[in-house]
Image (cartoon, rainbow, N blue to C red):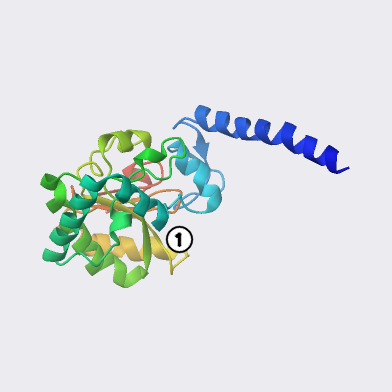
Amino acid sequence: MLFLCALVLVLFIPTGVNIARNSLAKFDHKTPVKVGFGLRANQEFPFYPAAAIMYRRRTPRLQSERAYRKWLEENPAKAEMVRQYQSFLNDNNVGEIIPMRELLQGCADNPLKPELAFDVPPKALWPNIVPTLKWFDANARPIIGKVRLYHGYRNPDANKACGSRSPVHPANSAIDFVPMEMHDPAKIERLMCSAFRAKGKTAKIGMGFYGVGLIHIDTRGYRSWGPDTRSATSPCKV
């Protein structure tokens, strides 16, 4: 009996792993998923593959502190830039709002390209994140509580791997996060949209609600969108 069980494991586990790997490789950004903010049971939208896959875990993948430390150890030049970046954020009074590990997480939820999980933005882009973090800290965090950031700066390769054509993450002006203390999508939408309408225009806030539970904020222009990336589906229409 033990021999038969061992034989089954040897024969079928590699096959299952290969099937899963092949499925990921064939998953393209046009694959529809039915989830999240603003969607009803009969609605669907195209999203990038990692989001469709990782939603089954309720949220996209967040890289561990251990993975982050390993990345720093293997990239000493980038580790020094991270230290300087943290000092810059501290000097601009935004250094304690979001953990650095989360700010540097680019496309960690793409299981096919784990090497794109972290990167530090070029110095010329450092100022771009300051107004975004300040607006988030003053207007979003007080009403929805603790959040977990899943996407911050993305280099162009990471942006492409995540299926995005938008320039806001490569410009280091955007954050994508999930509320950790509030779990009612309708209430989250209502509170965030209220803040967006009241204080978003002068700060040039862009706000998006993605079907995997992520909320996007940037400071690259006053606009909003819903799960299919269209303004027509935004709960914050003005």
Pick whichever, 22 or 40, lies toward us.
22
Q: Which residue is mark 1?
A: 185
Q: In the image, what residue occupies the spot 66% across and 33% down?
A: 14
Q: Specify whether 107 is left or right of 1.
A: left
Q: Quadrant of the C terminus?
A: bottom left
Instruction: Judge whether residue 169 can be spotted in this image.
Output: yes
Query: Furthest residue to the right?
Result: 1
Pick whichever, 149 or 194, lies toward us.
149
Q: Specify whether 33 is left or right of 196.
A: right
Pick whichever, 74 or 59, lies toward us.
74
Q: In the image, what residue occupies the spot 50% across and 41% down?
A: 52
Q: In the image, what residue occupies the spot 50% across and 46% down?
A: 54
Establish if 155 lies above or below 172. above
Residue 149 location in percent, x, y? 35, 57
Instruction: Judge whether residue 237 can be spotted in this image.
Output: no
Instruction: Describe the element under mark 1 as helix, strand or loop.
Output: helix
Establish if 40 lies above or below 155. below
Crowding near the residue tagged with mark 1, few <14, some 14–19, many ≥20 C-alpha atoms within 10 Å: some
User: Residue 202 sits in which quadrant?
Assistant: bottom left
The kind of residue on which mark 1 rests is Pro
Residue 153 location in percent, x, y? 26, 47
